[in-house]
Amino acid sequence: MRVLEPWLAEPLRELVRESGARVALLMTASGQVLAQHGFTRSLDVMAAAALGSGILATTGELARLVGNEAGFGAVVHQGRQQGVWLAGFDTPRGRWVGLIVFGRGSTTGLVRLFFERFAARIQALAPAPTVVREVLAEGFERELDASLRQLFGTS
Amino acid sequence: MTPARWQALLEEVTLIGGVRGAAVVSAEDGLVVHEAAMDGVATADVAALATALVRRAQSLLQVLGDEVPRMVTLAATRGTLVAVQGKLDLWLVALAEPGAELGRLRLLLGDLAPELG
Amino acid sequence: MTDLPLAPPDPGHAFLDLGERLRLRGQLEAALSVALAGAGRYPSLAAAHDLVGRIRADQGDDDGARSAWIAALECDQGAVGALKGLAFLAFRRQDLAEAERRLEAAALEAPRDTTILAALDRVRASQPAFREEPIQFDDPDAGILLFDAEGLRLAGGVGGAAADAADIAAAAGLGLVREADRTVRLLDLGECRHILVEGSRARLVAAPVAPHGGVLLHRPVTAPAGRVVAMAERAVAAARRWLEEAR
């Protein structure tokens, strides 16, 4: 497990343990990765983060199209051997997104239960937002690389 | 089975003294299919946890050469959870207070569960 | 037309019929000779060992009868004759708990056999209040298993199943107890007392023995649910004492 900020570790650990998640990813709504468990390659993390945030953005548009302005709470993709849970939640630091991959040892219901508890813990524990630095384009890739190195323990 | 029939079935269960609520649950994904009057408890949580309990019970029963459990009863100091297998991987789950008519509840759930699906 | 005797299903098993006829006529030595020869020739035939058991019981050789019926069960776990025979021996030496277990197992195999049900009623009526049934952790056939906080078996068994099945059951029992603990915690139901699991053939009760692990009781589905639960609750108390003494 790798986290950008230490306070994320325990809530994420509990989520993974209780829900039986094989893979877990926490990111901002724009796809910046905050924590991960179970990924072995940085490329997979980046791809999952981009796809996950994209899916939620798309379903948000679909929700508005059908008159559900508040959006959909969660998206679940259920395969024969694995399922994917994708859900957004508000934090003092903005909108965050969780992606959970679970196998046949768990259920959508269990993942939902413990994800909601996780989101509540994050909301309660999140430190106050810091002053936002303006990130220039040339600094963006450097920041992303640094984040990924920290998430994979190579920093 | 129609939602109206499910509703009638669950209401029959909740008429037993001490029963806080009842739900039809899908064991495949731990989600609520239909529910009635879960007093003070999130039905979705009951569904998820009851399903996980049933799966553990099934693992144990299979070690001993039996198959899927027909009924699982979790007795605790402040209440009892009873889950009975229906058809199509649906389970009938009830939550009861201490002192509820457990024998009658078990019999009724056993009678009604085969109607699920 | 002459009356032709019906051919036995398997000509090789004709000794069963002959041995039984000799036994019923009181010719026990001859019956035993036939039965032992047959059991030697067909060692995996439960009925052969069952016949030996019945003859030995008639001879008053309870140890010999017991050995034969155990052999029958090793060939066929559901051999009703052997289960009834062992129940009879247990009842004779006033081991009512074993008698009841054997009859419950027999009732599972032959649910319409009214003689078994009548015998079961008699055994239960003969028992002192069932609260006095001894809790035996050291008897692997008693169907009571004690496991520790890591799911390792400490004592007991699951009633006739192999030792490795008992070890697996211990691990699974801990998983069930932990899941129950999580459920009661998250649903605010207090503390877990026990979990009753009922299948088509068995009734199991798992109960935590905080903080050490738990107990698991395994009975045929013919055992009354309330009785099995009550025994499990007594087993929890006995387990605490057992663990204290074991330290």
Image (cartoon, grey):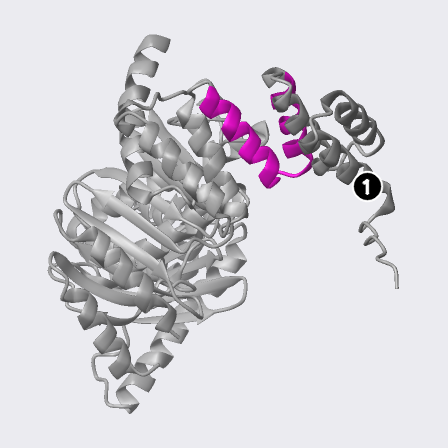
Q: Picture quarter containing residue C62?
A: top right
Q: Picture quarter containing residue B8?
A: bottom left
Boundaries of the magenta span: C64-92
Is residue B38 visible in this depiction of the protein? Answer: yes
Indicate whether residue C142 is drawn in magenta. Answer: no
Asked whether B117 or C59 is in front, the reply is: C59
Give the vertical position of B109 relative to A5 (above or below). below
Secondary structure of the residue carrying numbered label 1: helix
Asked whether A96 or B26 is in front, the reply is: B26
Q: Quadrant location of the N terminus of chain C? A: bottom right
Give the vertical position of A145 relative to A75 (above or below). above
Q: Quadrant location of the C terminus of chain C? A: top left
The residue located at (33%, 24%) in the rendering is: C133
x, y percentage for residue A49?
42, 64
x, y percentage for residue A110?
34, 57
The residue located at (47%, 37%) in the rendering is: C103
Indicate whether residue C84 is drawn in magenta. Answer: yes
The residue located at (81%, 49%) in the rendering is: C8
Count of numbered circles in the view: 1
Give the vertical position of A90 relative to C158 (above or below). below
- The secondary structure that most of the magenta stretch takes on is helix
x, y percentage for residue A40?
53, 49
Q: Crowding near pointer 1: few (<14 within 10 Å), some, many (20+)?
A: some
Is residue A29 visible in this depiction of the protein? Answer: no
Is residue B52 left or right of B75 when viewed as pictured? Answer: right
Give the vertical position of C246 relative to B94 (above or below). above
Please state the chain letter of the residue tagged with numbered disc 1 in the rendered image: C
Report the residue marked by disc 1.
Answer: C13
Asked whether A25 or C137 is in front, the reply is: C137
Is residue C245 left or right of C74 when viewed as pictured? Answer: left
Is residue B104 left or right of C42 when viewed as pictured? Answer: left
Tag 1: amino acid = His
